[in-house]
Image (cartoon, helix red, strand yellow):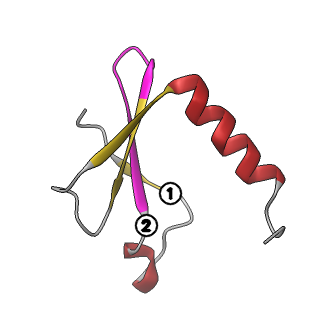
Amino acid sequence: MDNWRKSSYSGEGDGNECVEIASSPAYTHVSVRDSKAPAGATLTFPAGTFAAFVDVLKTTTGDR
């Protein structure tokens, strides 16, 4: 996967401490990597599983 992108919430300064994601060409999988170490390990998830994870994050914001 080579279409890595950072969160739109990444800004200047601390914005470099973020994760990046990339989708497979057929959008069947999503990979995640640390933006500070892009040559390091990646985690890959089925697209539906990743979408469910993101949905939970969106609904539980502030519930720490």
Q: Is residue 22 magenta?
A: yes
Mark 1 against mark 2, which lies toward the viewer?
Answer: 2
Please identify the quadrant where the C terminus is shown: bottom right
> Horizontal placement of 2 versus 22: left or right?
left
- 30 shown above or below 35: above
Q: Is residue 53 magenta?
A: no
- 33 shown above or below 17: above
- Give the image location of residue 40, x and y in percent: 19, 56
What is the span of residues highlighted in magenta in the rendered image?
A: 19-29
Residue situated furthest bottom in the rendering: 13
Residue type at mark 2 is Cys
- Neighbor class of circle 1 (other Cα within 10 Å; few <14, some 14-19, many 20+) is few
- Give the image location of residue 36, x and y in percent: 28, 69
Q: Dot 2 corresponds to which residue?
A: 18
Residue plotted at (44% across, 83% down): 14
Which of the 4 quarters of the picture holds residue 45? top left
> Horizontal placement of 48 versus 3: left or right?
right
Asked which secondary structure carries label 2, the reply is: loop
**Do residues under tags 1 and 2 come within 8 Å of each other at their CB atoms?**
yes
- Give the image location of residue 22, x and y in percent: 37, 38
Residue type at mark 1 is Ser
> Horizontal placement of 16 versus 57: left or right?
left
Please identify the quadrant where the N terminus is shown: top left
Residue situated furthest top in the rendering: 26
User: Which one is earlier in the sequence, the residue at label 1 or at label 2?
Assistant: 1
Asked which secondary structure carries label 1, the reply is: loop
> Horizontal placement of 2 versus 45: left or right?
left
Residue plotted at (50% across, 57% down): 7
Q: Dot 1 corresponds to which residue?
A: 7
What distance separates the C-alpha of mark 1 from that of mark 2? 7 Å
